[in-house]
Image: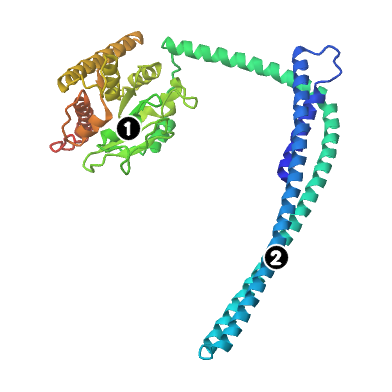
Amino acid sequence: MQRGITQAVAAGCWLASKLFGSGGSDPNPTYAAIQEREWAEAERDRAIKDLANTRAQVTQLVQTIQGMQNRALQFQQDALSAAAVAQQRNQEQMTAMVAAERAANAARFAAENAARLATEESKNKAKEAEAERQRTQAAMEGARRAVEAVQQDAERLQRAAEEEKKKADEAIAGAEAARKAAENGVREATAAKEDAERRLKEGIQPVVTPTPREILAAQEKIQYQENLFHFAVAGRAGGGKSSLVNAFRGMSNRAVGSARTGVIETTLTVGRYPDPDERCQHVWYDLPGAGTMKIPDWQYFNAQGLYVFDCIVVLFDNRFTQTDIAILLNCRRFKIPTYIVRSKADQHIRNIMKEMGYESDDENFDRTQRSAMYVAAREQLVEETRRNVKANLAEANLPDHKVYVVSSSCLRTVAKGEQSPRVIDEINLLNDLYMEAQARRVRREESEGISTSEIGPK
């Protein structure tokens, strides 16, 4: 209650400052100042109303305390009634002792025990009544102090309002200066943003070459090892990077040691996931999504240290965007092998089938019709995806690039060495990735004079 009253008083102080702050010495107030004054007057009335409500709450608290006193008296009456009942029981037991001599001892013991229990119960109720009375007195004292605090706070509020009125003119002048400065800052930031977006659309990206120290720091960050092949899955936020990393490793999203997945962007730092098969010298990396407020498109490549990875999978979901173009341009500059992958193929195929008129609960569709419609939707998805990517690459002056259309569930099945009836590009993607890793390993070991007779993919 005390905190609620204090908050009401604090709100009143602030409202009073707004009310008296808008009534400066300016004989020609602006329309904004008039509006601010009207708003402040409304807030003052609301503060007064809140104070009245607080007083009503105090009155209600006093009524509650009175009710607690009544219950305390009732507890005392119950204690007296319990004692009377105990006394009556004692008399009845004494009479029974006279009438039945054989059961005299047992009856006497029972009567004494019952009397003892009744006495203890009476004492306990008396103690409870006394405790209730003390709590009631404490509550009444708290209410009295709360009323006094309200009065004192009201006086402080009045004094604070008078002081704030004196500072109102200076505050208005400072606010106006701050507003003008903020408008200038917004205009400059907007111009810079528009220029950066224009340059990005035109393919003019800031060229930032990492220093040797930055390269070493990036390698240490991902725990880079020369005897391992480091795959990175990059792309815009929400594209399914974590699910794809789990699928590459043949793991479900809920398995122990899998990359965390979710509806929103859940990967905030680089996740390092070794292959479950210890014989495979592959490490998978789940990178935070690009295109967020924290990671702008053009800074994504250098910010995540992508220049230290051996291979980068550029993942996209619905559209091939400028983020993907920026990654490919930088990968080309650093001569890093890249693989363009469109994820969530199963979802896209279902959406295309619905556009064709398919409904899963429609009994008119038999298995043959559904299979034919699935094949048509899959071909449409693959053709549209590759056409879209090819057009975007040509617009960015990049050479044509192979595109893989996959679903995480099917890729996970293939990665585990099992067969799936709905394979699109999953097998080709895994083979190409592992062939790239094998080729790099062969080149490195040949340069070091190491035998490659037992080298092979997973």
Residue that sits furthest to the front in the current view: 99
- Which color mode does the image show? rainbow
Quadrant including the C terminus: top left
User: Which picture quadrant has residue 291?
Assistant: top left
Quadrant including the N terminus: top right
* Sequence-earlier tag: 1 or 2: 2
Examine the rendering and report whether any part of residue 434 can be seen.
yes
Mark 1 is surrounded, within 10 Å at the Cα level, by few (under 14), some (14 to 19) or many (20 or more) other residues, namely: many
Residue pictured at 69% horizontal, 70% vertical: 80
Percent across and percent down for residue 190 are: 57, 14
Between the C-alphas of marks 1 and 2, the distance is 71 Å
In the rendered image, which residue does mark 2 sit on? 77
| Foreground: disc 1 or disc 2 | 2
Percent across and percent down for residue 19 are: 80, 25
Residue in front for this viewpoint, 422 or 70: 70
Residue pictured at 33% horizontal, 23% vertical: 314
Label of residue 243 in the image: 1
User: Which picture quadrant has residue 407?
Assistant: top left
